[in-house]
Image: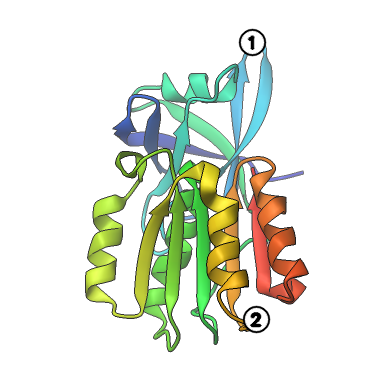
Amino acid sequence: MALEREGRIIRIVEHAPDTRSLFLRSERLPYRPGQFISCLLPVGGETLIRPYSLASDPEEADLEICLNLVPGGVGSPYLLALPVGAPIRFTGPWGTFVLERAPEAETIFIADGTAIAPIRPMLHRALATAPRHPLRLLYAAESERRLLYRAELERLAREHPLFSFDHVASRALRDEVARRWVDADADRSRRFFICGVGDIVPALRDVLRRAGYERRAVQYEKW
């Protein structure tokens, strides 16, 4: 049986009216960049289990989860209504979508909306472990105003010559990935870390693997 832990909300950051980060203070939780916790939510007389990726770094004292309101959902309205001081029970960490250090190849991170959450600590870890190859983030969102952690990403791009990031509209994500890393050249040595919601994730995986990238070179997590 998974060990249950409890965190308490110590801070809430509102990114947009429907998108927030909750910062949880708990006992120290060893985890790897990219992993998630499963929140145990008492809703409607039962306990719902909802996974949320950790947007914080393992070296940080508190845990950060980032979420938006899911239309018709049950878990997200509950969490978004919680005030500072509220407890949240959870298990974890879980997941194998992880990155321990900068890969020995050009690396492309692809995130759609709040799926930047697990990518963010991966980027931090890659940049902190002396990368020797370019690190690129392609961030999909409805508009540039919807990019989470934008100021931080701009700062990282200024401080690290090997890091760059670009915005693309979510509806154009598949075509943009194919244009940049399939049609543009024959280089198939790159590494990819992809996170998003729904069918776009396996679609990107298939585009890249059919183009000749090795299976292990295309890591992904579908929400």
Tag 1: amino acid: Gly
Q: Position of residue 109 (x, y in %)?
A: 51, 64
Residue nearest the observer in this picture, 18 or 165? 165
Residue beneath the point at 62% across and 71% down: 182
Quarter of the image where the C terminus is located = top right
Q: Which residue is mark 2?
A: 188
In the rendered structure, the answer to whether residue 123 lies left or right of residue 53 reads: left
Task: Bin the neighbour count of mark 2 within 10 Å (Cα to Cα): few under 14, some 14-19, many 20 and up.
Answer: some
Name the disc covering residue 147, or none: none
Residue 144, quarter of the rendered image: top left
Residue beneath the point at 38% across and 50% down: 62
Determine whether 16 is above or below 82 in the image.
below
Tag 2: amino acid: Arg
Residue nearest the observer in this picture, 170 or 151? 170
Q: Position of residue 176 (x, y in %)?
A: 53, 58
Determine whether 59 is above or below 39 in the image.
below
Which mark sits nearer the N-terminus, 2 or 1? 1
In the rendered image, the residue lying farthest to the top is 44
Q: Are marks 2 and 1 in contact (CB under 8 Å)?
A: no
Q: Which residue is mark 1?
A: 44
Kindly tell me whether residue 53 is visible in this rendering.
Answer: no
Residue 66, quarter of the rendered image: top left
Quarter of the image where the N terminus is located = top right
